[in-house]
Amino acid sequence: MKDLNLSATAPVVSQRDEDQVLEIRLAQAEDALVIPYMWLRDHCRSKRYFNHTTQQKIPDLELLERDLTPQAVRADSKGLSIKWRDGHETDYTYDWLANNFYPGQFARRTKRILWDRKKMESESLPAVTFEHHMTSEDGLRQSLRNLVKYGFTMVTEAPPTAEGTRQASERISPIQESMYGGLWTVSPAMGNNDTAYTHASLGAHTDNTYLTSPAGIEVFHILEHDGTGGESLLVDGFNAVDTIRRDDPKAFQTLQDTPIPFEYMATAANGKPPYLMKAYSPIFTEHPGTGELLTFRFNAYDRGTMDTVKPQDLPQFYAAYQKISQVISSPASQLWFQLSPGTVLLVDNWRVMHGRSAFTGFRLLSGCYLSRDEWISQARMLEVL
C-alpha cells in the first residue's frame, strides 16, 4: 500500500495495488470507501465514457482486457484524479463517490424509523397540511420525508372530495392505473368482488401482492360515513421483519427463502373483463447492495395454494409464517386511529400494512395507487433519498 501526497484538508487516500483497490477515508464517514479499480474505471464520467446530455453510459467493451492499475493518483480537497496506464484520465468528486459507491452506506439522507404502537403513540402522527403540501416545495419534501421515515403520512385540511384526493395524490406522482381504474371509490353498496367492499373488518395486509410489481403508495380518504366503527389500522411490516430477525433467526431465514403464491380472481362485471392475477414472492426482500429491507408483501386474503414448498418442509414454513402473523396481529404492533373527511392518508405499500375495523352505516372512501418508481424518483429529486 502507498499513501498519496494530500493537502491538509483532503481526505486520506491510499492506493493498494496488491488488492486492486483505492481506499478513501472521508471526514464525515465512519468507515473508509474501499473501491476496486475496476469499479472506478467502469464509472468514469469523462466524455469518452459518459454522455452528459442524455445522462447515459457509453459502453466500454474492452474494460476487462485492460490493466486497470492506475499509473498515478492525485487527490486534493477538491476531488480525485486518476491517470490510467492506457493514458486515459478520470476525475471524481468525493461527494459523487460517497453517494454512488454502494448506495445507502453513507448517502441515505432520511433515516428510516421502525415503529410499533408504543413508538407512534409517543409522538405526533406524521402530517402536513394540504396547503403546505400543495403550494410549497418544503411541504412536499416533508410529505416524502415522512413516507421514507415512517412508511406513511397524512395530508390534513384537504377538501373532503374525490378531487381533494386527486390533488393531494398527484402532487407526489401521477395516479397509477390498475384493474380498479385510476381514482376509485369504495363503499359496501357497490358490491364488488372483494372483501374491501363490505362492512367487515380487514386485518393488516399490503395490496397488490398478486402483481409482479405492487403499487408503491396506496391513498385513502374517507369522504362520508354516517355510522360507527371503521377505524384505520397500520402495521410497520419492516418492524415485524426486524422483530423476527432478532427473536427467531431460523424463521427469518425461512421467510426470506420461501416464495409465496398470491392470486386474485374476478369474474367479468360492470363492463370489466375477468382477471386471474398471480405472483410469487417471499414476504420480504433485501436491497442487493446495502442489505436494507426493500419490500414487504403480506396478504392472508390473497395467499394462493402453496405450491412452492416441498411437503417435508411445510412444517418449518408454516411455523415461520405463524410467527410473523402473530407479530403482525399483536396489539403491540398495531396503530389504530380514526380518519375523517379532509384527512388523506398515504401509505408506502412496500412497507406498511393497512386494515380497518368493521363498521356500520354508509361509508364512502376514495383512493388510488401511486407508482413506486414515480414517488421514489420524486424523493431523490428533492434530496429526501
Image: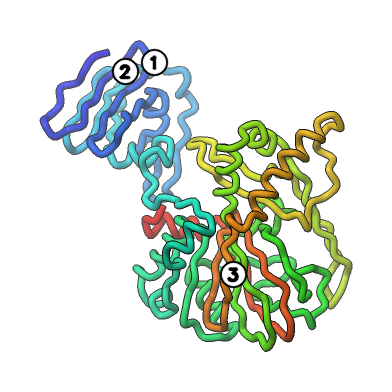
Q: 291 left or right of 250?
A: left
Within 10 Å of the Cα at label 2, are there few (<14), some (14-19), or many (20+) other Cα atoms?
Answer: some
Position above or below: 108 against 379: above
> SS class of the residue under badge 3?
strand
Q: Residue at x 45, y 24 (%)?
A: 63
First in sequence: mark 3 or mark 2? 2
User: What residue did someone put label 2 on?
Assistant: 85
> Where does residue 351 sit, x and y in percent of width and height?
58, 53
> Where does residue 192 sit, x and y in percent of width and height?
81, 74
User: What residue did someone put label 3 on?
Assistant: 219
Q: 78 left or right of 321?
A: left
> Where does residue 362 sit, x and y in percent of width and height?
72, 86
Position above or below: 305 against 346: above
The residue mark sitting in front, 3 or 2, is 3
Q: Residue at x 63, y 63 (%)?
A: 354
| CB atoms of marks 1 and 2 within 8 Å | yes
Name the residue furthest top: 18
Q: Residue 37 lies in what quarter of the image? A: top left
Marks 3/2: CA–CA distance: 55 Å
Q: Identify the amino acid type marked 1.
A: Asp
Name the residue furthest bottom: 226
Q: Residue at x 42, y 48 (%)?
A: 55
Q: Identify the amino acid type marked 2.
A: Arg
User: What residue did someone put label 1 on?
Assistant: 67
Q: Please state which of residues 193 and 174 is positioned toward the viewer in this rendering.
A: 193
For the question of whether residue 371 can be seen, the reply is no
Position above or below: 184 against 216: below
For the question of whether residue 133 can be seen, the reply is yes
Within 10 Å of the Cα at label 1, are there few (<14), some (14-19), or many (20+) other Cα atoms?
Answer: few
